[in-house]
Image (cartoon, coloured by chain):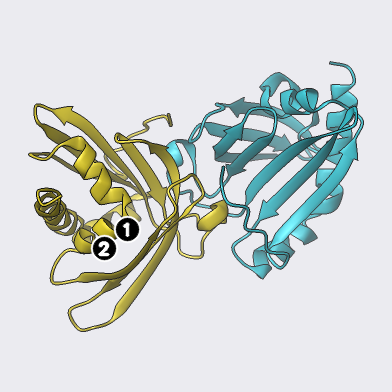
Chain colours: A cyan, B yellow
Amino acid sequence: MSPDLHDPRLDLVLERVVDVPRALVWDAWTKPEHLIQWFAPAPWTTVDCEVDLRPGGIFRSVMRSPQGEDFPGVGCFLEIVEGRRLVWTDALGPGFRPSAKPFFTAIIALEDYGAGTKYTARALHKDETDRKTHEDMGFHTGWGTALDQLVALAKTL
Amino acid sequence: MSPDLHDPRLDLVLERVVDVPRALVWDAWTKPEHLIQWFAPAPWTTVDCEVDLRPGGIFRSVMRSPQGEDFPGVGCFLEIVEGRRLVWTDALGPGFRPSAKPFFTAIIALEDYGAGTKYTARALHKDETDRKTHEDMGFHTGWGTALDQLVALAKTL
């Protein structure tokens, strides 16, 4: 597993206990037919996504704003520990090729917590400026709302 | 294994058959005490290096120019297939954190070829400008000379 090198000046973290089992959280994150339902915080929507779940495999999504503008995002997966840990970045594209707009790496960690799951999402940035930009874009509200949506979906699975 | 998404406009490739066994080429690439002896093409030298051989683990080297100036480089490993495939990038640092100076991803592939090894080193860039910059820095001569040095070292192992 990759080394955990946390840096509070450079990272943004969403940590929460949710009342759905770990396996369902994993499915919601890794199956495109689920992901498309929760990934963008409302009133934004996800209108397309692509998941090739292996290191170097594509992770692509298109988010649509309430005004109808589409924002495509593409990156690749870096590390997959079935049911427990998912790492991806937009600093590399499919096949690990460096990307034109590197911004962050996401580490999603899942642990059993009673009948539920301790969910930790961490966004890693290269410097404090990028961390602050992401924070000002609404990281905490956005990722929190998306997690609410994930939980609501998982309860229907 | 990661998808191979080659693009001749964006990649630089060094492909050669060398007369040393695959296992020794692998050792030369992955053991710091060997790497430090061949990694910089003479008259440059490698004066320090660090290898944490796992996805997200650090890959750091310091090259010294003939004029005595030191050039540190830091990146991380992305994919390790023992004896066969080594992928690393400077677009991410240790722990997969996006780096300040992303430039290329390297894919080193080794195949048995008689008693020797078919050696393929591929450098992936985000655009043609970066590919050309790397080419003009002397990619082919530099990586070729370093491979000669690797082979010479491997024959002593």
**Label annotation for residue B32:** 1
Amino acid under disc 1: Pro
Residue at 32% from the left image edge and 45% from the top image edge: B10
Side (left or right) of A79 relative to A42? left
Q: Residues within 10 Å of mark 2 (few under 14, many from 20)?
A: many
Place of residue A64 in the rendered image (x, y in percent of width and height, measured from the top left):
74, 36
Mark 1 belongs to chain: B
Side (left or right) of A80 relative to B118? right
Place of residue B106 in the rendered image (x, y in percent of width and height, measured from the top left):
34, 47
**Label annotation for residue B36:** 2
- Dot 1 and dot 2 residues touching (CB under 8 Å): yes
Residue at 18% from the left image edge and 61% from the top image edge: B138
Element under disc 2: helix
Place of residue A91 in the rendered image (x, y in percent of width and height, measured from the top left):
53, 50
Side (left or right) of B82 relative to A91? left
Residue at 67% from the left image edge and 69% from the top image edge: A128
Picture quarter containing residue B137? bottom left
Mark 2 belongs to chain: B
Element under disc 1: helix
- Nearest the eye: B69 or B60: B60
Amino acid under disc 2: Ile
